[in-house]
Image: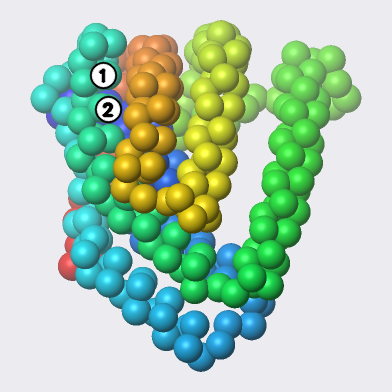
Amino acid sequence: MKKLLIASVTVAAIGLGGLALAQPLGPGMRHHEPVKEMVKHLRDLSLSDTQREEIKTLVSAFKDANPRPKFGDIEKPSFDFDTATEAQLSAFIQAQFEEREATHFAFAQLRHDIYNVLNEEQQATLLARDAKRELDIQKHRDAFVKQDARFTKRMDGEGKGPKRKPREFLFEGIELSDEQIASLAELRESFKDTSKTNRETLRNFKDAQRDLIRSQSFSQDAWDALIAQYKGDLVSAKVEKAKQHQAMFQVLSPEQQAKLEALREEERELYELFKP
């Protein structure tokens, strides 16, 4: 049971589900939510009835060929995550990546085909919208950095108001001591530079995916070459994320780990109620 618990926490945290490793819409996203995200991009483009029918046919074919995974399924490794070596983590994550490669390409092909349904004016509108969104994202990142700095001062008692205790979302439902909170904060600080580098790698990968998908040179070979270029870095980033969560999990006492296990088991039982 402990094996399943740590696997559940870690796999959820590193975003192995669905298309998270290879599609550019964000880790942890549910199986068909990338399609929903594309719908948002296509709004206000004045699609003709013919274009709508073409897109509908493309999306339906994609869904038929890539059925939704069973609700609540968790892919479990054959080893304990709390004692797993880096080699075991790497092999597990790489296997997950490779199992999804066909679906990754199918989704990229869908995006490419839908983009080509648009006329030149619609494509230009989409590109301008993407450029604006990138600026908005950067502004959001800058604002988050400033907010994080203010929060750190508040935590250290340097800002105005009483010193605050942060919520620990990874271990929600577990009462942490001040010492544990401090230990988790120190761990996060030690992860900061590596995490930043990995986020930059992922952003570069997303940009490269998007550019290839919208180019006339898109093909299976070109896609495979792009994946091969980034695969090692992506797997390494996920391994590092898993190791970080291993370290954070070890901050908990055996009693807290047992309580977290009980909470996760209850969640799994509730998921079972919603299975089709």
Q: Which residue is mark 1?
A: 89
Local secondary structure at mark 2: helix
**Residue, far bottom:** 49
Residue 40: image location, x then y, percent: 57, 67
Q: Is residue 186 above or below residue 202?
A: above
Label 1 amino acid? Leu
Res. 165 visible in picture? yes
Question: Looking at the image, do the residues carrying marks 2 and 1 touch, with CB atoms under 8 Å apart?
Answer: yes
Residue 52: image location, x then y, percent: 48, 83
Assess disc 2: are there few (<14), some (14-19) or many (≥20) residues with their C-alpha within 10 Å of its C-alpha.
many
Q: Residue at 41%, 35% (x, y): give it.
A: 226
The CA distance from mark 2 to mark 1 is: 6 Å
Q: Is residue 258 above or below residue 31?
A: above
Asked if residue 113 lies left or right of residue 210, the reply is: left
Res. 15 visible in picture? no
Q: Quadrant of residue 56?
A: bottom left
Residue 150: image location, x then y, percent: 80, 25
Q: Is residue 264 above or below residue 198?
A: below
Q: Quadrant of residue 124?
A: bottom right
Q: Is residue 233 above or below residue 206?
A: above
Label disc, if present, on residue 93 of the rendered structure: 2
Q: Residue at 49%, 73% (x, y): give it.
A: 117
Label 2 amino acid? Ile
Quadrant containing the N terminus is: top left
- The one nearer the camera, 98 or 147, is 98
